[in-house]
């Protein structure tokens, strides 16, 4: 898509954002509100190097940057915002 738009001179930048687990209401049924919520949350992010869920405003900040003039020369990028999951996927077990 990025190459097509550039080749057609459309002045449209095509980038994508790939978030991992972001703390939104979709997680509420799994996390619940009981005394074990923090344990369930910790278990869900145990394989995330930053050991936490992402925040919506972190993903939004990336989207705003991509839409800004700061990213005017950026197209065809796939941006992962995952707390280090992708980078840590090659790490040895028990890291």
Image (cartoon, rainbow, N blue to C red):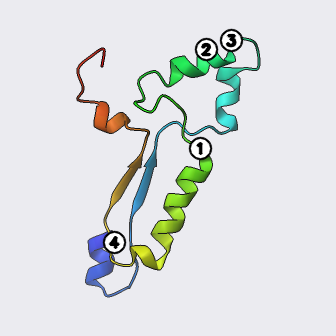
- Dot 3 lies on which element? loop
**Separation of disc 3 and disc 4 at Cα?**
43 Å
Residue 3 higher or lower than 28, as above or below = below
Q: In which quadrant will I find the C terminus? A: top left
Outermost top residue: 36
Give the image location of residue 70, x and y in percent. Answer: 43, 75
Crowd class of label 3 (few under 14; some 14 to 19; many from 20; radius 10 Å): few
**Separation of disc 3 and disc 1 at Cα?**
21 Å
Residue 56 higher or lower than 28, as above or below = below
Q: Residue at x 54, y 59 (%)?
A: 61
**Separation of disc 4 and disc 1 at Cα?**
24 Å
Q: Residue at x 32, y 62 (%)?
A: 77
| Residue 41 marker | none
**Separation of disc 2 and disc 4 at Cα?**
40 Å
Q: Which residue is mark 3?
A: 36
Crowd class of label 1 (few under 14; some 14 to 19; many from 20; radius 10 Å): few
Q: Are marks 3 and 2 in contact (CB under 8 Å)?
A: yes
**Separation of disc 2 and disc 1 at Cα?**
19 Å
Q: Quadrant of residue 48?
A: top left
Q: Are marks 2 and 1 in contact (CB under 8 Å)?
A: no
Q: In which quadrant will I find the N terminus? A: bottom left
Outermost bottom residue: 9
- Dot 1 lies on which element? loop
Q: Residue at x 52, y 22 (%)?
A: 44
- The answer to which of marks 3 and 1 sits earlier in the sequence is 3
Q: Which residue is mark 1?
A: 55
Q: Which residue is mark 2?
A: 39
Q: Which residue is mark 4?
A: 74
- The answer to which of marks 3 and 4 sits earlier in the sequence is 3
């Amino acid at each position: 898509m990025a190459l097509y738009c550039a080749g057609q001179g459309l002045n449209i930048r095509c980038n994508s954002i790939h978030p991992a687990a972001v703390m939104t209401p979709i997680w509420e049924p799994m996390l619940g509100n009981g005394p074990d919520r923090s344990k369930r949350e910790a278990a869900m992010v145990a394989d995330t190097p930053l050991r936490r869920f992402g925040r919506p405003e972190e993903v939004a900040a990336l989207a705003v940057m991509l839409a800004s003039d700061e990213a005017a020369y950026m197209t065809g990028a796939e941006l992962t915002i995952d707390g280090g999951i992708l980078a840590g996927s090659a790490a040895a077990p028990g890291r």
